[in-house]
């Protein structure tokens, strides 16, 4: 074969390798971007769940405080009833 044919084959091979490397790089960048997007979405979901959990914990604490206050009121009312009831021995 002539020299120019070998040169054309070499140039074509180099171009093929370069195109392969570029496409692999683009695919990697696309995959990384997809992973970043997924991570961002997961972080948003986690933050939302965390806020909901904090809110529910706050509501639960408030309800527990109310229950304790009502329990104390009930105890006071029961003591008062015992004081008023003539059938209860001191």
Image: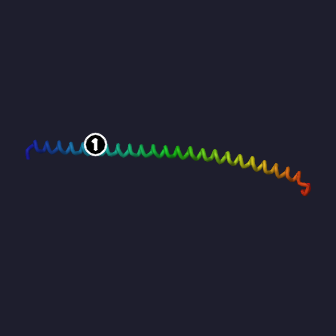
Query: Which residue in the rendered view is the most extreme toward the left?
Result: 2
Residue 43 position, x and y percent, is 49, 44
Q: How is the image coloured?
A: rainbow
Q: Secondary structure at mark 1?
A: helix
Image-based side of 8 in relation to 34, left or right: left
* Residue shown at the point (15%, 45%) measured from the top left: 9
Name the one closer to the observer, 25 or 56.
56
Residue appearing at x 49%, y 43% in the figure: 44
* Of 60 and 31, the residue lying toward us: 60
Circle 1 crowding by C-alpha within 10 Å: few under 14, some 14–19, many from 20 = few
Residue 58, image x, y percentages: 63, 44
Residue 81, compared with residue 11, is above or below; it is below
| Residue 55, quarter of picture | top right
Return the residue nearer the eye: 67 or 25.
67
Q: Is residue 58 left or right of residue 9?
A: right
Depth check: 45 or 34 in front?
Answer: 45
Q: For the point 26% across and 45% down, which residue is it?
A: 20
Q: x%, y% of residue 3?
A: 10, 43
Please state, as top left, top right, bottom left or bottom right, where the C terminus lies in the image: bottom right
Q: Left or right: where does residue 66 sit relative to residue 15?
A: right
Q: Position of residue 64 (x, y in %)?
A: 69, 48
Which picture quadrant has residue 41?
top left
How many numbered marks have been drawn onto this rendered protein structure? Answer: 1
Task: Please give the name of the residue rendered at 28% of the width and 42% of the height, measured from the top-left corner.
Answer: 22
Which residue in the structure is indicated by mark 1? 22
């Amino acid at each position: 074969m002539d020299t120019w044919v070998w040169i054309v084959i070499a140039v074509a091979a180099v171009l093929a390798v370069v195109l392969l490397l570029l496409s692999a790089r683009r695919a990697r960048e696309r995959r990384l971007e997809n992973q970043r997007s997924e991570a961002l979405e997961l972080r948003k979901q986690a933050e939302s769940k965390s806020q909901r959990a904090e809110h529910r914990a706050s509501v639960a604490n408030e309800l527990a405080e109310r229950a304790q206050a009502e329990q104390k009121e009930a105890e006071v009312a029961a003591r008062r009833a015992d004081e008023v009831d003539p059938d209860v021995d001191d």
